[in-house]
Image (cartoon, rainbow, N blue to C red):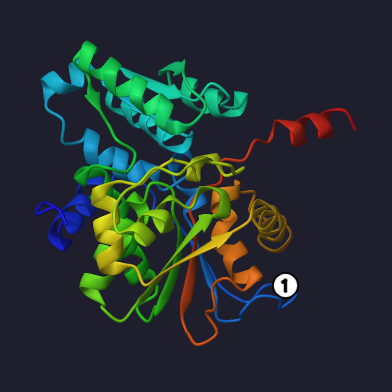
Amino acid sequence: MSAILTLATIQQARARIAGYVRHTPLLPAPSLRGDMPAQLRLKLENLQVTGSFKARGVFNTLLQLNTEERARGVITASGGNHGAALAYGAWRLGIPATIFLTAHASADRVARVTMWGAQVRQHGQVWDDAHAAATEYAQTAGATYVHPFDADRTIAGQGTLGLELLEDVPTIDCVLVAIGGGGLIAGMALAMKETRPGIRIIGVEPVGSAAMRYALERGQVAPLPEVRTIADTLAPRAVSERTLSLTQRYVDEIVTVSDAQMVSAMRWLWAECNQLVEPAGAAVIAAIQSGAANISNHTHPVALICGGNAAVEPVFTAYANS
């Protein structure tokens, strides 16, 4: 674990970003039909500014840049949510921003970035391709590269969500967290386990993009042979040494879910909770529904709904034409 990443740095990050992010709501049980564990609660981080937890790490990073660094601007590569959060944070603080997305990023993803005035460049088929291009561009431009998961400031910012959950549910004994690059679960697990060691931390990955499980099985970071999932915000080919180390130390279990299971969970969240979420945001529900994660022995479990940036234009179009 990085010497910089401690419970204290996460507590400092929470104070630093307090005026820029929301304390998101907790949805109480039970579900309408009683088809989910009655004790389950949902942390609706999909209602965070820009629609995901990513704003936490972004603001913790941007607020620590000096005047010269702000003037040179910031750059990142993103599956969508981190890019939108960085674009918003940069707009809020008056910092120029350039966001690299993949070549096949949806029009909705591009729009969520450009609406805040950031420049968009599209490159490659997967996040890793965009990341390579973005880091090279940042070096040439002299701008600060804001990594979506492999950076102490990012992870500390995401860890503030763990502190918030401990405040929301003082008796929490289990939390389910989706994993992309691992920054969210790394920060949250550090914050929660250092405060309450007995909490069970369960990570959830798509079957077609289980980079953290792949690294854990090998005992080292290794790129996946291929990435195949609809959950584009959970789809790096590899995690990082930093996030792997924290996961090895603090996370109890990693489970996987299929794309079909995530789609079913998305439907459940809409029907039961009136929450329109992206596949990544539904992954934790899919883990419970499929039986991949067994939470029956826990009295106060929480599922983190990490992102809600599902495209809504088809819905608007349908209503407009009805």
Q: Quadrant of the C terminus?
A: top right
Amino acid type, callout 1:
Leu
Q: Closer to the camera, 165 or 218?
A: 218
Q: Closer to the camera, 150 or 42?
A: 150
Q: Is residue 151 above or below residue 285?
A: above
Q: Is residue 304 above or below residue 225?
A: below
Q: Residue at x 71, y 76 (%)?
A: 35
Q: Residue at x 27, y 44 (%)?
A: 154
Residue reaching furthest top?
A: 140
Q: Closer to the camera, 230 or 99?
A: 230
Graded by Cα atoms within 10 Å as few (under 14), some (14 to 19) or many (20 or more), the crowding at tag 1 reads few
Q: Position of residue 267 (x, y in %)?
A: 72, 55
Q: Position of residue 151 (x, y in %)?
A: 23, 42
Q: Is residue 71 visible?
A: yes
Q: Is residue 18 visible?
A: no
Identify the residue position indicated by label 1 in the image.
Answer: 32
Q: Residue at x 29, y 15 (%)?
A: 137
Q: Is residue 294 above or below residue 175?
A: below
